[in-house]
Image: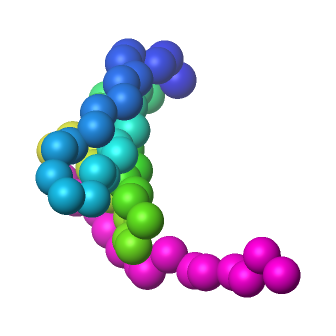
Amino acid sequence: MQLICADWTGIGSFMKTFEKTWSAQYRDMEISVRNFWNLERTGAEVYINGRRVYHNEAEMASASLR
């Protein structure tokens, strides 16, 4: 598997959402992964040859600092 690209993008709004994407080629497959998160939510999407094959989004957990 060969890593094609990786980048970090902050999308501006009241609450900044961060995003990391990368893509790779393996045999005849183009694989892309997108991870995103902010203080409230986190998620991931996986695409193979342009077709979304996985999506997950969840609320961030919280923990007391006491």
Front residue (pair 24, 45): 45
At 39% from the left and 38% from the top, the residue drawn is 20
Quadrant housing residue 37:
bottom left
Residue 18 visible, this orientation: yes
Depth check, front residue: 8 or 2: 8
- Is residue 49 magenta-colored? no
Residue 32, visible in the rendered structure: no
Residue occupying image coordinates x 32% and y 68%:
55
Q: Which residue, as the protein is rendered here, is positioned at the far front?
A: 66
Tell me what residue is drawn at x 36 percent, y 18 percent: 5
Question: Quadrant of residue 57 in the image?
Answer: bottom left
Q: Nearer the viewer, residue 27 or 45?
A: 45
Q: Is residue 38 above or below residue 33?
A: below
In the rendered image, the vertical position of residue 49 relative to residue 17, given as above or below: above
Q: From the top left corner, tell me how far across and down residue 63 is, in percent.
A: 69, 81
43 left or right, relative to 62: left
Q: Is residue 35 above or below residue 57?
A: above
Q: Position of residue 65 (x, y in %)?
A: 77, 76
Residue at the spot 19% in from the left edge and 58% down from the top edge:
14
Q: Is 26 placed left or right of 51 in the picture?
A: right
Magenta segment boundaries in residue numbering: 51-66
x then y, percent, for residue 50: 16, 44
Q: Quadrant of the C terminus?
A: bottom right
